[in-house]
């Protein structure tokens, strides 16, 4: 008994360390320490568990820990910063899968019993199975989308109705399983249904809505851990899971607000399915954009007093963050005031652009949120849009009928000049043509961002 | 509904509030590390996985436990390591510039 007490105290300490660690993540100065505090808490929880006298055979545990550590370490070390969203999606899936398996094991342990599970345990197990399963398969679909394997939103007739019926069926089966004696086959149906649901819920969501999905799956992986905690009556799991659940929900909410859309609209709206593309592109046909070459662009930038860079997903695709910083350094050396304006949904996950620019050694003190940049944007000489589109589309502000109406944007159209680095005039993810490209003070620098910036760097050096 | 479940729900709800309070203060620039760090914390189910893999129950249980240990360990080790890798890149000024 005494020994168990120490284990539980260790769990409590671990939960406290998680909270302290997350608290230190609120500033870049202390964040690294915070992460290590949380990691130490995890180590403590694992060691305490290994002292549990229920454990009699360590062979599989040791093999499992070594295998998992190796795979995790290799993935963490080799992943490129541009691929971070996929990485987090996969880890979410693994976390959710592990929690689901913990719930499943508890069900298996009661196999052969003639009595139904107690209601408490039954509810916890079914919740853990459902959330864990959805998180696991949903995360892998998200991974496939982020990896570019299946980027577009997949829709079919009666999709919502079908998904709803499936979800209702899953809940009905769960209730049946709680009330009846242990039925392994039906339980397998439930687990399978959870996996199918995870796939079906994520496939209708388009590539650029991924920040919301990744954040939401993050939240689910936490809730799955909490459910596993209820299954095992372990408060450390319940607390940790709730912290992660809360974190994911906050980020989900921030992402939705940054697009001025409700969560329901993101999840079921099948945004970016391409319905509007035809009309918008046709309407744009008559307009002429003003192209600019690297030399003129270099002149504009080099003789400006202030420049704001607005990065988007295209920056990540082109891996142009290092080049961009190189250009920024050159401009700064000439006395230009350089800032970066980061839209919350630029990129494929919350904070994606910040990490990319940090990788390129851009100090985070140069990164500004839209509400810090917009009030002063009229005094900016040149706003440079690098691989962003919808987040700088003035239609969001001016056209109440636009699909992205009300979405906060970086108001680059109000800057004295605007240069847009883009491959072509194709509309962005939302399938909406961007009026910005055709404004008199906008110049288009066509080509891949990496190449274009390299050319501009060359020209600035030649000045 | 038993006392244990009720206590669990209490703990869950209160922890959610703690989470909201603490995480709302995280600035947008750290949102990606926050996600990957929080994600690593959700690997806490490793605690349950270890017990299942080591209790020496049926073969099926050991297999489930083993797979769960592997998945959770990838989540934990990978999550904390990648978060650390990201956080070391965040700097206030140009000091210590090396990689490009």
Image (tube, helix red, strand yellow):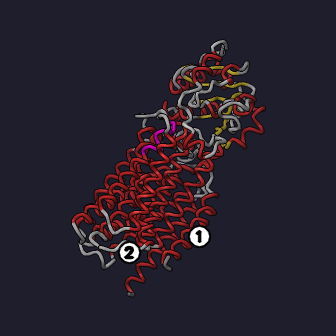
Q: Name the residue under label 1.
A: B14
Does residue B96 appear left or right of residue A409 in this picture? Answer: left
Q: Position of residue A309 (x, y in %)?
A: 64, 33
User: Against A419, is A191 above or below?
Assistant: below
Q: Give the range drawn in magenta.
A: A199-206
Q: Position of residue B96 (x, y in %)?
A: 53, 47
Q: Position of residue A32 (x, y in %)?
A: 52, 57
Does the segment drawn in magenta span residue A204? Answer: yes
The answer to whether residue A460 shows anywhere in this view is: yes
3D distance between C-alphas at marks 1 and 2 = 24 Å
Does the segment drawn in magenta span residue B62? Answer: no
Q: Name the residue under label 2.
A: A48
For image coordinates 36% across by 64% down, the residue present is A102
For image coordinates 39% across by 87% down, the residue present is A2
User: Against B84, is A312 above or below?
Assistant: above
The quarter of the displayed image where residue A409 is located: top right
User: Against B23, is A295 above or below?
Assistant: above
State the SS at label 1: helix
Q: Where is residue A398 in the image (x, y as percent from the top left)?
A: 75, 30
A167, B89: nearer the viewer: A167
Does residue A95 appear left or right of residue A359 in this picture? Answer: left
Q: Which of label 1 and label 2 is nearer to you?
A: 1
Q: Mark 1 lies on which chain?
A: B
């Amino acid at each position: 008994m005494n020994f168990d007490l120490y284990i539980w105290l260790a769990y409590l300490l671990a939960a406290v360390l998680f909270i302290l660690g997350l608290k230190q993540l609120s500033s870049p100065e202390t964040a690294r320490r915070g992460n290590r505090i949380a990691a130490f808490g995890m180590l403590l929880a694992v060691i305490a568990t290994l002292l549990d006298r229920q454990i009699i055979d360590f062979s599989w545990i040791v093999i499992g820990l070594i295998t998992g550590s190796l795979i995790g370490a290799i993935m963490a070390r080799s992943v490129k910063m541009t691929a971070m969203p996929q990485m987090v999606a996969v880890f979410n899936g693994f976390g959710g899968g592990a929690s689901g398996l913990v719930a499943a094991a508890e069900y298996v342990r009661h196999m052969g019993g003639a009595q139904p599970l107690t209601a408490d345990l039954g509810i916890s197990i079914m919740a853990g199975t459902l959330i864990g399963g959805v998180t696991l398969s949903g995360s892998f679909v998200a991974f496939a989308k982020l990896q570019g394997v299946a980027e577009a939103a997949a829709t079919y007739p009666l999709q919502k109705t079908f998904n709803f019926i499936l979800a209702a069926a899953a809940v009905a089966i769960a209730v049946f399983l709680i009330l009846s004696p242990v039925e392994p086959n039906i339980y397998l149906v439930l687990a399978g249904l959870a996996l199918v649901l995870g796939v079906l819920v994520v496939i209708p969501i388009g590539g650029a809505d991924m920040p919301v999905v990744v954040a939401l799956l993050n939240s689910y992986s936490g809730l799955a851990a909490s459910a596993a905690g209820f299954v095992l009556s372990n408060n450390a799991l319940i607390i940790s899971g709730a912290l992660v659940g809360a974190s994911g929900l906050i980020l989900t909410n921030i992402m939705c607000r940054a697009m001025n859309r409700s969560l329901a609209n993101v999840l079921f709206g099948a945004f970016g399915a391409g319905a509007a593309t035809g009309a918008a592109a046709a309407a744009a046909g008559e307009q002429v954009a003003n192209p600019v070459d690297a030399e003129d662009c270099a002149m504009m930038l080099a003789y400006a007093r202030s420049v704001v860079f607005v990065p988007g997903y295209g920056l990540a695709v082109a891996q142009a963050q290092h080049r961009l910083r190189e250009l920024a350094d050159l401009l700064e050396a000439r006395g230009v005031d350089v800032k970066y304006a980061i839209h919350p949904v630029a990129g494929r996950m919350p904070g994606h652009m910040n990490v990319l620019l940090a990788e390129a050694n851009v100090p985070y003190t140069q990164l500004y949120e839209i509400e810090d940049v917009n009030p002063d944007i009229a005094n900016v000489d040149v706003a440079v849009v690098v691989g962003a589109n919808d987040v700088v589309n003035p239609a969001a502000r001016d056209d109440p009928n636009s699909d992205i109406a009300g979405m906060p944007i970086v108001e680059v159209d109000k800057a004295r000049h605007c240069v847009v680095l883009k491959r072509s005039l194709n509309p962005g993810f939302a399938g909406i043509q961007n009026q910005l490209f055709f404004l008199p003070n906008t110049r288009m620098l066509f080509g891949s961002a990496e190449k274009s910036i390299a050319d501009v760097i060359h020209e600035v050096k030649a000045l | 509904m038993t006392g244990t479940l009720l206590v669990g729900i209490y703990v869950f709800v209160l922890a959610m509030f703690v989470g909201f309070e603490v995480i709302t203060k995280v600035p947008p620039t750290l949102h990606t590390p926050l996600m990957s760090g929080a994600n690593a914390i959700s690997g806490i189910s490793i605690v349950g996985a270890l017990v299942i893999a080591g209790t020496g129950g049926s073969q099926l249980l050991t297999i489930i436990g083993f797979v769960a240990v592997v998945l959770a360990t990838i989540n934990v080790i990978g999550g904390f390591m990648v978060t650390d890798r990201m956080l070391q890149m965040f700097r206030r000024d140009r000091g210590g510039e090396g990689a490009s």
